[in-house]
Each structure stands twice: as structure tokens, then as C-alpha cells.
Image: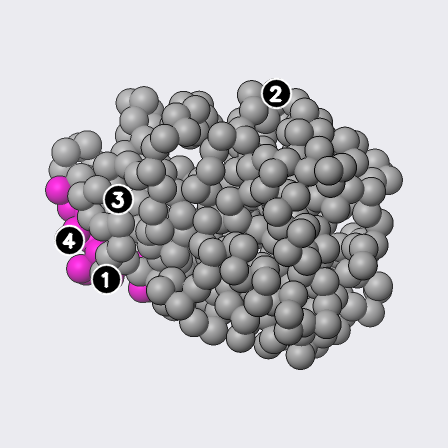
């Protein structure tokens, strides 16, 4: 079974905050499916990016979040502000106020659906479940191939029952935000190999392996387990076309650095490289506001620390394997990964 519009069975994972359409175009030009992370893009910027992708005539995927936004006031829970107060004092910053509570990540909504319908991207993917049925039906109506992330078999079966065309099996090794939406407990979630095998055995739709796939051997192993395709993100973070910051790049160059799951930077569980905030506050904090609001009170700390050349409060998203990262054009990463399909 093959994905539509596909040359290679390889998807460059959408990575909000560290990429724009340039990485997606470069991956697509090299034969993969390029992805655009849309959750943090204002609609005008999203429209421009979509037009560039459409005009290129290559297969591409547009990714959205499907979370339910919590009340904005939760961003400034007094317990969270108390935990951050010593850092505000240290950096000489005034305490944050509720006026700064702006969610940095927006769920898929009617305005985005209207914009997409005008462009009609061939592939649309969702993280944290699916949008409401009417919005999902609208995406299907123009013929988009719909993907969605699952971290457990139950989530995958839920997605299949609601009409997705393929399921992304996001193993625990994956960097960035966990796509869970039924069960957030990582203790009940699986590594990529085990999850792929479980989903292939039970699903009727294609399964896409994601998490900890950094080289041709990882690609080959996923395909041998029955995956229809693989999705890789961390391997592209050092590419010339990525927008990964200098501080983030410096840490990614150290392949032995540990990663852990944390909720500090957004309120949602995500895998990243350990930094000061994670060592001193967590990495898991019971007082962090719900996703995606934790970033609001952290933003001034992050900005000031980064200006001083420090990554103390910066989310350094990464999967468990960085040995596949290349400081090179994305085409070289695609070529290295694609060797796994030839063996």
C-alpha cells in the first residue's frame, strides 16, 4: 500500500517554531513529502506559505493542532507565577501580567479551513486528535488525504473510526509534543517499533512510523514491521533550510545529551533536551498551566536569557536520536534516509 502523491515513503515531520515552507519545499524537491507546521502561523503567513507550496507543484502536507483551548486566565496561575518569580528577579524583569496571555498555538478552526479550501493542499494532518466533525468533513470534501497522530492503539482505532486515511504511530522516542488525546500517561505509551507492530496488526488504514528514526537502518526496520511510510523530524533540525536557532543547533550537535519528557514550555507533554528550567523546575511540574498556555509567562524569561546567549528557558525539542542530524541541505538528509528503502 502506498500513500498518494508519493515518490519516497518518507515524510519530513512538521515542526512548529523551527521551520517554514523552505524546509518543506527542499524535502519535497528531494523526493520526500514536505510538511508545513501551521499551528503557530498567523493566517496571512499561512496563506503565503501555502501559495508557495502549491506553486511548486510538489506533494506536501499541512499540519494543524486539534486541541481544545483552555481559559486564557489559566496562563497566570499564582502557583506557576510563584515558581517563576525567582527567575524574574534574577533577570531583572517585572512580574508578568494577565495582559500578556496569548496562546502561541491555535487549533484548526473555520478560518483556517476556509483558507485551505481555496488552496486545497493534497495532504492535511492533525495532532492531538481531530477537529470537530463538520471541519473534518470539509477537509475531506475537497479530496485531501487526512493523517493524524496516535500514541496508543486505542487512539489509532478512534482515529480510524472517524475516517482518517492513515495513522501516524508516534512512539515515545519522538521529539516535540506528544500527540496523545485519549490517555496522556506516558507509562501506557509505547516505543515506536512496538506501537507500529500493534497498529499494523489491527488497522485497515496505512500506518506511518514516527519517533527515533534517524538513519537508513531505522527506516528499513520500520518498513519491515509493516509501516507504509516513515516520518522523520529531528534528523532535519540542523539542515540549511531549517529555522532552528543557534542555541538549539549548538545543543543538537551533542548526540549524547539526554532528552526527557517535559510540560514546562507549553503545558503539554513534549520531548526535548535538558536545560536549566527542566533541571530546576521539573521536568514535569504540577503547577504548569494547561497546553498551550505555559509559554506565556515563560516568554519574557526566554527572551532575556536568549539575549544573554543562554538556553535556560528555551524549548530544545529533540527526539532520542540525533546521530542522523546533518548540517547540510535537506536533500542530503532525504538521500541518507531513503537508502533504507533500497535494501
Q: In this figure, which residue is indicated by the disc labeled 4?
A: 82
Comparing 82 with 192, the one in front is 192
Hey, which quadrant is residue 108 in on the image? Answer: bottom right
Q: In this figure, which residue is indicated by the disc labeled 3?
A: 278
Left or right placement of residue 331 versus residue 109 in this view: right
Give the vertical position of 132 relative to 84 (above or below): below
Label 2 – label 3 distance at C-alpha: 30 Å
Give the vertical position of 144 relative to 338 (above or below): below
Left or right placement of residue 261 versus residue 118 in this view: left
Q: Secondary structure at mark 1?
A: loop
Badge number at residue 286: 1
Q: Residue at x 57, y 51 (%)?
A: 210
Residue 106 image point, x, y percent: 53, 57
Q: Earlier in the sequence, mark 1 or mark 4?
A: 4
Give the vertical position of 276 relative to 290 (above or below): above
Q: In this figure, which residue is indicated by the disc labeled 2?
A: 328
Q: What segment is highlighted magenta in the picture?
A: 73-86
> In the image, which is nearer the foreground, mark 2 or mark 3?
2
Give the vertical position of 153 relative to 212 (above or below): below
Residue 270 image point, x, y percent: 41, 51
Q: Secondary structure at mark 4?
A: helix
Label 1 – label 3 distance at C-alpha: 13 Å
Q: Secondary structure at mark 2?
A: loop
Hey, which quadrant is residue 88 in on the image? Answer: top left
Label 3 – label 4 distance at C-alpha: 16 Å
Label 1 – label 4 distance at C-alpha: 13 Å
Left or right placement of residue 105 versus residue 216 in this view: left
Callouts 2 and 1 close, C-beta under 8 Å:
no
Amino acid at each position: 500500500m502506498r500513500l498518494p502523491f508519493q515518490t519516497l515513503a518518507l515524510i519530513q515531520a512538521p515542526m512548529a517554531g523551527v521551520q517554514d515552507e523552505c524546509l518543506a519545499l527542499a524535502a519535497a524537491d528531494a523526493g520526500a513529502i514536505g510538511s508545513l507546521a501551521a499551528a503557530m502561523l498567523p493566517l496571512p503567513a499561512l496563506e503565503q506559505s501555502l501559495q508557495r507550496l502549491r506553486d511548486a507543484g510538489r506533494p506536501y502536507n499541512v499540519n494543524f493542532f486539534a486541541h481544545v483551548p483552555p481559559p486564557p486566565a489559566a496562563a497566570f496561575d499564582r502557583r506557576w507565577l510563584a515558581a517563576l518569580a525567582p527567575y524574574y528577579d534574577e533577570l531583572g524583569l517585572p512580574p508578568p501580567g494577565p495582559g500578556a496571555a496569548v496562546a502561541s498555538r491555535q487549533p484548526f478552526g473555520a478560518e483556517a479551513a476556509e483558507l485551505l479550501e481555496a488552496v486545497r493542499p493534497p495532504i492535511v494532518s492533525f495532532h492531538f486528535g481531530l477537529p470537530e466533525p463538520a471541519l473534518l468533513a470539509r477537509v475531506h470534501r475537497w479530496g485531501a488525504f487526512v493523517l493524524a497522530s496516535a500514541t496508543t492503539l486505542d487512539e489509532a482505532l478512534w482515529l480510524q473510526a472517524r475516517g482518517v486515511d492513515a495513522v501516524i504511530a508516534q512512539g515515545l522516542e519522538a521529539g516535540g509534543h506528544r500527540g496523545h488525546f485519549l490517555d496522556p500517561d506516558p507509562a501506557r505509551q509505547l516505543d515506536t517499533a512496538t506501537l507500529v507492530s500493534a497498529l499494523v496488526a489491527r488497522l485497515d488504514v496505512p500506518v506511518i512510523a514516527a519517533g527515533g528514526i534517524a538513519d537508513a537502518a531505522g527506516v528499513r526496520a520500520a518498513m519491515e514491521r509493516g509501516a507504509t511510510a516513515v516520518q522523520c523530524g529531528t534528523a532535519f533540525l540542523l539542515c540549511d533550510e531549517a529555522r532552528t536557532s543557534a542555541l538549539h543547533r549548538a545543543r543538537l550537535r551533542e548526540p549524547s545529551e539526554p532528552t526527557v519528557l517535559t510540560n514546562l514550555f507549553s503545558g503539554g507533554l513534549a520531548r526535548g533536551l535538558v536545560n536549566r528550567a527542566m533541571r530546576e523546575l521539573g521536568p514535569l511540574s504540577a503547577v504548569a498551566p494547561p497546553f498551550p498556555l505555559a509559554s506565556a509567562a515563560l516568554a519574557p524569561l526566554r527572551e532575556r536569557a536568549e539575549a544573554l546567549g543562554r538556553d535556560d528557558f528555551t524549548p530544545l525539542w529533540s527526539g532520542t536520536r540525533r546521530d542522523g542530524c546533518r548540517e547540510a541541505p535537506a536533500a542530503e538528509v532525504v538521500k541518507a534516509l531513503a537508502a533504507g528503502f533500497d535494501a
